[in-house]
Image: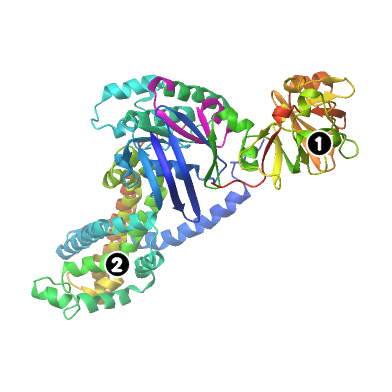
Amino acid sequence: MKRVTSFGLFDWVFGFAGVFLLLFILIPLLTTLFSTTPGEIVASLGEKDVLHSLWVTFAAAFLATAIALVVGVPLAYLLARREFPGKNLVQGIIDLPIIIPHTAAGVALLMVFGRRGLLGEPLQSAGVYFTENMAGIVVAMLFVSLPILVDTAREAFALVDERLEKVARTLGAGAWSAFRRVTLPLALRGIVAGSVLMWARGISEFGAIVILAYNPKAISVLIYERFAGFGLSAALPLTALLLIVALVILVVTRTLLLPRRSKERRR
Amino acid sequence: MIRLENVLVRAGAFSLHINELALDEGEFLVVLGPTGSGKTVLLETIAGLRTPVQGRVWFGEREVTGELPEARRVGFVYQDYLLFPHLTVYRNISFGLRRKDDRKRVRQLAELLGIEGLLHRYPDGLSGGERQRVALARALAIEPLVMLLDEPLSALDRATRGELRGEILTLHQELGTTVLHVTHDLDEGMALGDRLAVLVDGELRQVGPPTHVVRRPNDIEVAALVGATNILPAEGMVPAESMGAASRQGGPGADSVGGGASVTALPRVRLVGGLELHATSFAPGWNEGSCAAVIRPEDVAVESEAEGEAVSGRCTDGCEGEGFRGRITDIRIHSSLAVVETEVQASLTLTAHLLRPEVERLGLERGARVRLKVAPDCVHVCPHEPVRP
């Protein structure tokens, strides 16, 4: 007898569509990887400005994610749980950075955080600079990748049954305690996944960074500079290196995010 | 012990209005209501998870209307258990305990509910019955002033439901906890409740001993909810003294015949279509202009015209004369009961519940001609429209 779950025409058609998409992503990436040699990649790791650029990029993305966690997760909770006037507007504002070109985001940020910007000018007198400074990279990354964390965290909170909080409340837990002991642990995987995605998105940012904080050079800016100044061959090892690092990070975090209690199955 | 006074709660477009509801200490009150009648809203209001827009909630002498849920000490058990999936059974039960190492209390409850072997398991590996036991233990751990049970048995299979129903009753008797249990299942209400309250469209329509509510519903909606399937629209009453003149009424193929001296002193309710029935019980608020005769299906005796033998025990002695003649239109056989539909008039079908073997013994079948009998004390007259307090 033919089993319902066996691989039929349906699955072949859907599978073919998926393979097409995978190849579309993989071919350019693999071509880049194989256009350079392992020796060149390792050599690029020895360059001081490459190492510095990697450090600046990863650290700035980390800081941007940390800031988003502190200010974005509470907002995500409210968006998932509460009804309030203007909720759709708030949601729209949060998602705005997704649809505006990132160079435009850079210009907008420059108007606020630039040397003569709304906040940039007063903060400059307090010794805080955003242009030509890592703070600018953090701000650019935060602006363009914040929607990823807020949206993922909002979905994660929405998936936690609100009545679990209610039960916790009846068992004597206050609102903070119910959030800390029940909602947050249950939404944590989604929040961590959103953080990783936000961090990864931050690393890949170019448009906003290049306008607000060209220096210190983030890795995307460095690749562009080498490509513009020295041609394709100069940009290739660095590009390949970034691809490998991104792949390793994604695989490791995905593995860590696997279900914890897979051994105990529903009877 | 727990009292709601003129409480109004809004939940979106729905509103729950409880004029008065009081639970005595140690009482088991079952609230019966269809889906959307406001059962969960009622429980959440008592638990403090919803705030009334008017009215007061009292726990004994303490008014708790504005108190947060964490200050009220209520045990809340939902239909779908809602165990914390990231915590072991032990951590679930001890969640509300101040000292997390109160092993003694957790073990006592686990033993009481027969789940001591599950303490280190996670909820996703448990069966429905086990999960509900854990949910009960978790709620009982905080020594609640009241247990609020939101359809705790409806997600379980039949066998487990029966088992857990017995356990809930035993727990209530052993611990003496006050329980408010909401359900849409009348059998549950009958088996568990000291009193039964009926909630329809956010209003309490009737509160009383289960057998009283079932036999003497306040209106036709309550009657339908408590399984009185024969709700017969009436045109008015015929006073007791005009009895003789009113005999031999009815349409073609059916008649109602006056009986002996004992029933002649009773008033009769005249059904739409002309049939008349003696009635002995009248709901508060009924009026002649708009009323209905309510007859429970198990109170309808069926006599096969071919066999000449009444099969439904309750009414054989007190039944009126020759009863109604009719033709069986449908017989549905259940595990122990048979539901027999008999058309008495073009617009009047009566439902009778018989024990299944009786239907087989009498050879009742679709199309067979039968005689239906109802004792006067099984005819209850109630308002057609709900009487709102």
Q: Position of residue B246 (x, y in %)?
A: 84, 36
Q: Disc 1 vs disc 2: which is toward the camera?
A: 1
Rendered residue at 38%/24% (across/down): B118
> Tag on residue A205?
2
Residue B248 falls in image quadrant: top right
In this picture, residue A216 sits left or right of residue B143 = left
Which residue is outermost to the bottom?
A116
In this picture, residue A10 sits left or right of residue A152 = right
| Magenta segment boundaries in residue numbering | B173-196
Regarding mark 2 in the picture, which secondary structure is present there?
A: loop
Rendered residue at 42%/42% (across/down): B4
Rendered residue at 44%/50% (across/down): B9
> Disc 1 to disc 2, how far (Cα)?
96 Å
Front position in the image: B238 or B88: B238
Chain letter belonging to callout 1 = B
Front position in the image: B388 or A33: B388
Q: Position of residue B209 (x, y in %)?
A: 54, 29
Instruction: Give above or below for B292 relative to B353.
Output: below
> Tag on residue B242?
1
In this picture, residue B80 sits left or right of residue A218 = right
Q: Amino acid at mark 1?
A: Ser
Residue A195 falls in image quadrant: bottom left
Q: Position of residue B304 (x, y in %)?
A: 85, 24
Residue B119 falls in image quadrant: top left
